[in-house]
Each structure stands twice: as structure tokens, then as C-alpha cells.
Amino acid sequence: MTITPTIEAAGAPGVLEKVPLERYVAPERPSLVGLSRAALAEALGGIGVPERERKMRVQQLWHWLYVRGVTDFDAMSSVSKVLRAELARHFTLDRPEVAAEQISVDGTRKWLLTLPGEHPGEKPHLVECVYIPETDRGTLCVSSQVGCTLNCSFCHTGTQRLVRNLTPGEIVGQIMVARDRLGDWLAAAPAKGEGERKRLVSNIVMMGMGEPLYNFEAVRDALLVASDGDGLSLSRRRITLSTSGVVPQIARAGAEIGTMLAISLHAVRDELRDELVPLNRKYPIKELLDACRNYPGLSNARRITFEYVMLKDVNDSIADAKALVRLLKGIPAKINLIPFNPWPGSRYECSDWEQIEKFSQVVFDAGYASPVRTPRGRDILAACGQLKSATEKLSVRERMALRAMAMTD
Ligand code: SAH
Ligand code: SF4
């Protein structure tokens, strides 16, 4: 596959972005998962449902799909038998297929999902979706692309060559798969009080494989379905979209999606950020922070999360910590220090724990609460930046190296 360098800054040769070469080709019988209400009404019109009935039918389908999570049209008891048969003749309720499930010692679950390739006979693509249970919430880490068009130097996903944008159905489908596997749908006849039962999947982070703002329309449409109060009902305040800094799309995300925002900052100087997050050569730190300041609805209760991966002797000095605090002054912000998750062939090491603590103390003293998060699911390679589908298989040697790394904390 050809990789097109779109920008080569002087003195910093290398690929900034890859081009997504693969296209999604819809199957003959497409799935209804992920369609907006308008698209669903149109699909119904296409199979002869009269206009005057469509709104009501859409409401019924929406409930069966996104509240009950049915996988078979026959379970839709409020829909006439004739229409159920007609729907089944033209559509499916398919979500991505689970190729493998791994459960970490800490309860984190990782699902490997298969997605169709562009060409007949081609091996299916694999993406990963991770569920992280915590005492007060359950967070699902969702992918937006197979691979990623960007090449952050510390990220395993960025090394994957093949890139395909996920469809809204494939993005919403990850939430449906998680609810399927965790038994997290409302029962057909909920017991008294069951309607208010706490959902296992309560939060979504767009922090899996891919750069969500490089697949803007699909991510937007999927998140609008996910946040619909009559369906999956995940409020926008419980959805976080993480970006490496696609500046022109940040304002659009604020206006058209309105979820919480996380920025993968990782460095306080352009020179270093150019190396860690090459997209910085296109959209440098100042422009990125200006876009953050203008993100709608910011307040102390609605802050932007700044992610900062801790790389030994690269970005983890006390001077960096002080500069970070200065840089974010005036922006309602949270800081997330992420211990670097190593992967085979990675050229960085995670900062020493003492250094992370010192760094974190500076951040804490500046008024930011609990800046370090314990890495989750390392033993199953489910932590940030470790996601890379088995389309590019690891050698036995690499697997052994990984297992050794996972044991070292
Ligand atoms: N592409 C988006 C979202 C997916 S990456 C983005 O970059 O924001 C999710 C988070 O994991 C980002 O903050 C990313 O910088 C971080 N990350 C990537 N590789 C990592 C690694 N090896 N160790 C720790 N964090 C990593
Ligand atoms: Fe892509 Fe995010 Fe990884 Fe960078 S950190 S390569 S943007 S997935």
C-alpha cells in the first residue's frame, strides 16, 4: 500500500498522515444499526411503509434496537408479523461480530471485532473495543477507524498500515456488542425498579483505534444515536471524544456533537510535540489551545481533559510539569497523566514511578485533582495506545516480550 506524505517539515522528514485506502462496501442486506431516525424512516419508505406510519414505526424500531437490544426482528412483538418479515427480507440487526473476548485480571474486557474488508474474499479487518469497570461507572473505549491515519511515535495503533473509516453502524455496534456481552439491556418485562437499574456501560470514550475527528461524519452520527434519550441514552456529558488535535474540526465537534473533549497534548513545546504527535506540524500548540478556549459550554463542571503520556527522560521533567500548568492557565481543564504503555518495538520507556509522582505533585499543587490513572488491562494489551488489531500479527517473540512488560508493574 502506498503511503502519501502530506507534509514534510524542513528537518523533520517523515510521514505525517496516511491515506485511508479502504472503503466500506455495504452488504446486500444492510444492518439497521447506527441509522439516524431520518435514515431509518427513509429505509422504511424504501420497503413500502406508507409515510403516515413511518414516524411511529421508527419509534418502535428505535425502542427494540436501542432499549431492548433485540437481535432478531421476530422479537419485536409490537410490530406486525407482515412488517417483521418484510424487514427481515431487506435488513439485518447485525453488529460487528466478536472474534475473541479477553478478560483481564482487573475485570477489564477486550473484544476483538471483525469488520468486512472492501474486496470479496479479503480477510476481514479487526478492531478492538475495551470495557473498563470501575466502582462508580463502566467505561467503554470505542474505536473510530481500523488503524489510524496518524503516526504518533509512541502509539501502537499508529504503526498499523491499513486504515479504513468505521461506519456509524460499526461505531454504535461496539456499544451494542458490549451491552450484549455484559447482559446490559433492559429486560422485556423489567422487575419493579429495574428501569432505574444502573447500567454497566455508563460512559463512552472515543479513545480506541483511530482519530475520531478524521472520521467526523460517522463519529458524529454514531454519537448522536448513542446519546438519544429514547435509546441508548448515554448522556453527552458521559461521552468523551479524544483527539490528537485536528484543530479545524474541534469547533465543529462542539457545535455538531457537543460531547466532552479530551486533547492528547503530551508535550508543552512544539519542537517535542512535532516529534511525538506529528500532526502538531500542521496544527501547533498555540492554535490547538485557542480552539480549546473556544470549545462551547466550558465551565469548572465541564472541563477539557488534557492527556499527557509519561515518557522517561522525554517529557517528564519538573520543568515540563510547571510549563504544563502555565500553558493551561485560564482553560477549564483536567490533566490525565498516562503511564506509557510499552509495545514491542516501541522506542520509549515509561517514566519511573517516583518521577511520575513528582510530576503529578506539581500538577496537584496547581489545583488539578488526581492526575494519574492506574493503567487498566495491561495483561491483555487493552490499555491506551496498545490497541492494534491482529491483522498484523505479533510474533511469538513479541508476545513473550509483551507478557514480560505487562508483569513489570
Ligand atoms: N486518536 C485519538 C484517540 C485514540 S488514542 C487521540 O490520539 O487522542 C487514546 C489515547 O491514548 C491518546 O491520548 C493517546 O495519545 C494515548 N496513547 C497512545 N499510545 C499510547 C501508549 N503507548 N501509552 C499510553 N497512552 C497512549
Ligand atoms: Fe492515532 Fe491517536 Fe495513536 Fe496518534 S495516538 S496514532 S492519533 S490513535
Image: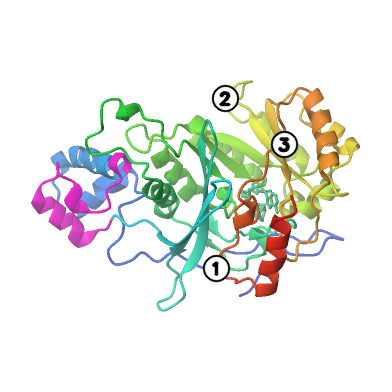
Q: Which quarter of the figure has residue 392?
A: bottom right
N-term-proximal mark, 2 vs 1:
1
Is mark 2 in CB contact (under 8 Å) with mark 3? no
Crowd band around label 3 with a 10 angstrom C-alpha radius: few (<14), some (14–19), many (20+)? many
- In three-dimensional space, the C-alpha distance between marks 2 and 3, rounded to whole angstroms, equals 25 Å
Amino acid type, mark 3: Val
Does any portion of residue 194 appear in the rendered image? Answer: yes
Give the labeled residue for mark 3. Answer: 372
Give the labeled residue for mark 1. Answer: 21
Give the labeled residue for mark 2. Answer: 297
Q: Residue at x 54, y 46 (%)?
A: 107
Is mark 1 in CB contact (under 8 Å) with mark 3? no
Is 84 magenta? The answer is yes
Amino acid type, mark 1: Leu
Crowd band around label 2 with a 10 angstrom C-alpha radius: few (<14), some (14–19), many (20+)? few
- In three-dimensional space, the C-alpha distance between marks 1 and 3, rounded to whole angstroms, equals 37 Å
N-term-proximal mark, 1 vs 3:
1
Name the side, left or right, on which 327 lies relative to 372. right
